[in-house]
Image (tube, helix red, strand yellow):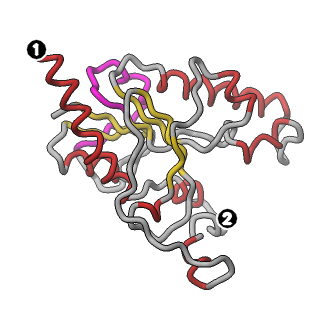
Amino acid sequence: MGRVLVACEYSGIVRDAFLALDHDAWSCDLIASERGSNRHIQGDVLEILHDGWDLIIVAHPPCTRLCNSGVRWLHKPPKGKTLEQMWHELDEGAAFFSKLWNAEVPHVAVENPVMHKHAKARIENYQDPAQIVQPWWFGEPQFKATGLYLRNLPNLVETDRLTAPKSGTKEHKAWSRVHRMPPGADRAKERSRFFPGIAKAMAEQWTPIINQTEMRRAA
């Protein structure tokens, strides 16, 4: 099995999906592991990018300045910020994404919303997301469009597509929990939490690709 690094993950959800299939999987984040795992590296992921990984999955990189929903702040900054700060944060976010996306690793997957044109222009070797998936395609009754930027990996195939509830119903509101989270100290942290159904599909569907890479390396 391969060496898998799950960057920008404190929950261990994606890491543990690969561990369950006997990969040498690790998570890395600036904050401590939520589960207290000894398979978590607390620190800057850029310092371990070149440690011999077969697959890097970036579960939720900082995307506030890159995504379409935040482009308005580049023209009219939020209270307490300046335009100069907004554009500087955009440059930092794009540089971070670029380093992960272009890492010298056989396979890379980055989860990120659809980006605006200023972000795209700043990312080295930018490509549009290979696909946009929803948790309810993988058995989880939740709405959250998840863009997957994939390099040398196939698109995920849905595993357990649920029937989405009609807009305006109580069930629809429940499925929209992520978008309806009230403001609070943990809002950003909780909104970045990955979905177990998608993580399981990643592990199961990408394991054969990783194994092929390992076999070619051993030949």
- Give the numbered dot on residue 198: none
Q: Residue at x 42, y 41 (%)?
A: 155
Type of amino acid under label 1: Ala
Q: Residues within 10 Å of mark 1 (few under 14, many from 20)?
A: few
Q: CA distance from mark 1 to mark 2?
A: 54 Å
- Give the numbered dot on residue 219: 1
On the rendered image, what quadrant is the N terminus found in? Answer: top left
Q: Residue at x 74, y 30 (%)?
A: 117
Q: Residues within 10 Å of mark 2 (few under 14, many from 20)?
A: few
Residue nearest the observer in this picture, 38 or 162: 162
Q: If you read the primary sequence from the N terminus, does the residue marked by circle 1 or circle 2 appear first?
A: 2
Q: Image check: 125 left or right of 35?
A: right
Q: Residue at x 82, y 36 (%)?
A: 74
For residue 41: magenta?
yes
Q: Nearer the viewer, mark 1 or mark 2?
A: 1
Residue 128 in which image quadrant: top right
Type of amino acid under label 2: Pro
* Residue reaching furthest to the right: 76
Residue 141 drawn above or below residue 78: below
On the rendered image, what quadrant is the C terminus found in? Answer: top left
Percent x, y for residue 120? 67, 27
Residue on which the image places disc 2: 183
Percent x, y for residue 42? 37, 38
Q: Please say whether residue 139 is visible from this viewpoint.
A: yes
Residue nearest the observer in this picture, 1 or 133: 133
Span shown in magenta: 38-56
Q: Please say whether residue 12 is visible from this viewpoint.
A: no
For residue 49: magenta?
yes
Q: Image check: 24 left or right of 76?
A: left
Give the structural element (helix, strand or loop) at label 2.
Answer: loop
